[in-house]
Amino acid sequence: MTSHKLFPSATLLVPESELEQYAHIPLDKATVPDAVMGISSLRNWVLKHFKEDSIIMLDDDICACVCMVSLRCRKLSMDETLQMLSNSAYNARGAGARLFGWHQRSDPRLLQRNDPFGVNHWVGGAVGVVRDANGGIPKWDELLKCKCDIDATLQELLDNRLVWNEARFCFVQERDKNLGGNSLFRSAERIATEKRHLKRKWKAHIDFGDYKSQDRVSMNAPRRQSIAL
């Protein structure tokens, strides 16, 4: 676990039966019923029990936040990271998005500097939610355990048209490698089953591939008119 070093003011969510095991982590803690299992159920539980207008849910293995618009990529300081989170939530609210996030890979070659914000990219790892004027929020499908964030993103694009993506920044983490947590549900068979389900559900709007021996997921949900020169 590394995220607590970057976010000392965060609230650590711990299963009720495991509270003592996390006593050494210097964060405020909130217990989650053991019956809440899987990342989808946890996200829905958080949004139900925490009433703030803006909520950011962070995986526990984040080790840095990288800015990709400098002459060289650099890691943000703790204070800069917290300010960037607040700015992202403010921008998402201004754009009318209820779901927001950041770039998935810290590769500056992937950043289009004249187009630093996206409105149709999937979020994961660090996920932000802004309640709309009526208190509305995205929903996660609790039957999904592994590919739930991209499903929630596509559902939000269908329901609310926009998902705010701050492409200038990326959180660095070790994806799908830690023990405990959601790894209890992760298996090749489970992932394959969820891929088939999502492909049937979203058809041409979702595609799966491989990148450096890891799963690669892409979406096709255009939100801008194509420009032909």
Image (tube, grey):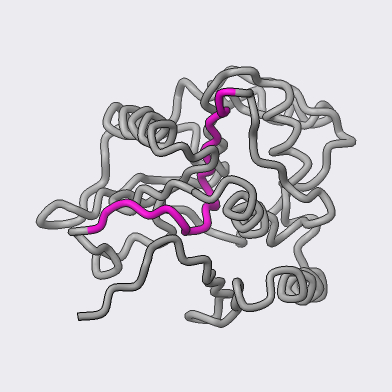
The image quarter containing residue 207 is bottom right
Residue 127 against residue 32 in the figure, above or below: below
- Residue 128 covered by magenta stretch: yes
Residue 189 against residue 32 in the figure, above or below: below
Specify whether 46 is left or right of 157: right
Depth order, front residue of 131/222:
222
**Residue at left offset 32%, top offset 34%:** 84
User: Which quadrant: the N terminus?
Assistant: top right
Relative image position of residue 55 (x, y in whole percent) = 55, 28
- Residue 73 covered by magenta stretch: no
Would residue 1 be visible to someone looking at this image?
A: no
**Residue at left offset 26%, top offset 46%:** 75
Q: Which residues are magenta?
A: 115-133
Depth order, front residue of 89/66:
89
Relative image position of residue 59 (x, y in whole percent) = 57, 44
Relative image position of residue 169 (x, y in whole percent) = 32, 49
